[in-house]
Amino acid sequence: MTKADIVNEIVSKTTLDKNDVQNTVDFFLKQVKSNMIEGKNIYFRGFGSFILKKRAKKIARNISKNTEMVIEEHFIPKFKPAKTFLEKVKKSEAVNRIGK
């Protein structure tokens, strides 16, 4: 599902204007990104959390050139689903059909 699909779904189930929905979704995503860039985690009860996860310093190897390079410790954005949401996905028949 794409952002456009989500916008169309919201428009079809509400009386909201498509441009308003598009602007709201864009603003929401912009807020999530800007707050994470500022080092803040974002929590949605019953859905999940957008958190910053620390990656440790490590040494990477370029096998073809036989060289090493140091990758400094850094943070990456990560989504952690809420337990209730995770359980619903695990028990979903549609998801179970995908795996077969």
Image: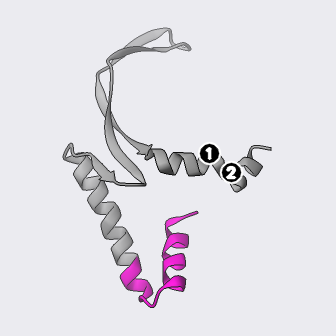
Q: Is residue 5 magenta?
A: yes
Residue at 49% x, 67% y: name it: 3
Query: In the rendered image of this protein, does residue 19 appear above or below residue 88?
Result: below
Q: Residue at x 29, y 50 (%)?
A: 42
Q: Are marks 1 and 2 in contact (CB under 8 Å)?
A: yes
Amino acid on which the number 1 mark rests in the picture: Lys
Residue 98 on image: x %, y %: 74, 49
Q: Secondary structure at mark 1?
A: helix
Along the line of sight, the residue nearer the viewer: 11 or 48? 48
Q: Which mark is residue 16?
A: none
Residue 76 figure quarter: top left
Residue tagged 1: 90
Position of the N terminus, as image quadrant, is: bottom right
Q: In front of the other: label 1 or label 2?
A: 1
Residue lying at the far left of the rendered structure: 38
Q: State how far apart marks 1 and 2 are (Cα).
A: 7 Å
Q: Residue at x 68, y 51 (%)?
A: 95
Q: Which residues are magenta?
A: 1-21
Q: Is residue 42 magenta?
A: no
Residue beneath disc 2? 95
